[in-house]
Amino acid sequence: MHYCGVVAVRGALQLAMLEEVRTEEPPIRLNALFYEPGSAAEVAHELHTLGDVVIGVGAPLAGPVNGRPGRDCDALLLRRGVAPQAPTQETRILADLLRDLAAFAPGGEDRTGPVEEGAYRRFPVFETNADGVFCALQGRRLPARRHPLGIQMRIDELLEDHVLDNGGNLWHRRIEEIDAIVCALCAHRYAVGHASWLGDPEEGVVVLPGASIPADFTRQGVMPPVERLHLSRA
């Protein structure tokens, strides 16, 4: 099984993939593979050649329905402190090119719930959010990616989840590669039945790792206190 993550990057798409590395002693390790950014057509072609895949797309797979100004899942993410991702032309094209692979649709009228075990067999594609995945893994908000501590916490999380970069070093990767591989990590959690979703099932939902999604990702204690001097008034 190939666990894949895709995110948008400067008019193209970034694809990354995880494969399980089983050893005599636990835990299971996950070998990371990274691709050069490419077009939606190139990414879709690669995904179709991989065989058994589970694909976490870190961008909207569908838009609002019934004339709504926005999607329910985006509002629910924002309420938890996670900025929704905007669709791009390439992610829209990718969603269309992957239409032969069913996207996750939980059904029902609830706005959140656990992903049923084995759902990946019927729905190998799902929408996720890279920052949301990191928040769910940490159980709290993370500093922004522009902050050095934000990058450190993201990479430390991947290392703690036994993600191995045999083609280099996670510290040498672009931030889009880090986002794509954490979407692939969410695909792995989705496949092993340890993921949850939120949103309106009629218009699309976002999947995050974990048995449930907190009502709020706290920011308390995330940033260590530092001293800053006040400028004197002119």
Image (cartoon, grey):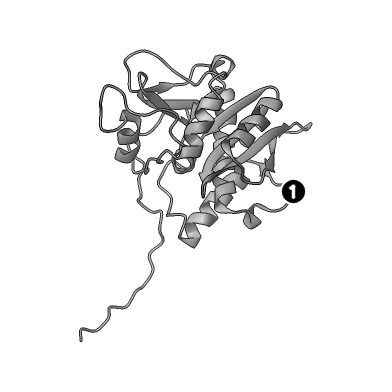
Looking at the image, the residue that sits furthest to the left is 234
The x, y position of residue 214, in whole percent, is 37, 34
Q: Quadrant of the N terminus?
A: top right
Residue 27 visible in the picture: no
Report whether residue 115 is seen.
yes
Find the residue positioned furthest to the bottom: 234
Where does residue 104 sit, x and y in percent of width and height?
48, 20
Front-most of residues 34 and 195 = 34
Q: Residue at x 62, y 47 (%)?
A: 159
Q: Position of residue 92 (x, y in %)?
A: 47, 33
Horizontally, residue 197 falls left or right of residue 179, namely left
Pointer 1 residue:
167
Q: Secondary structure at mark 1?
A: loop
The residue positioned 43% from the left and 33% from the top of the image is: 60
Q: Quadrant of residue 216?
A: top left
In the depicted structure, whether residue 41 falls above or below residue 172: above
Q: Say above or below: 96 vs 83.
A: above
In this rendering, the answer to whether 81 lies above or below 67 is below
Q: Is residue 144 toward the left or the right of residue 8 in the image?
A: left
- 61 or 112: nearer the viewer: 61
Q: Residue at x 70, y 47 (%)?
A: 165
Farthest residue to the right: give it.
24
Classify residue 174 as left or right of residue 202. right
Which quarter of the figure is the C terminus placed in? bottom left
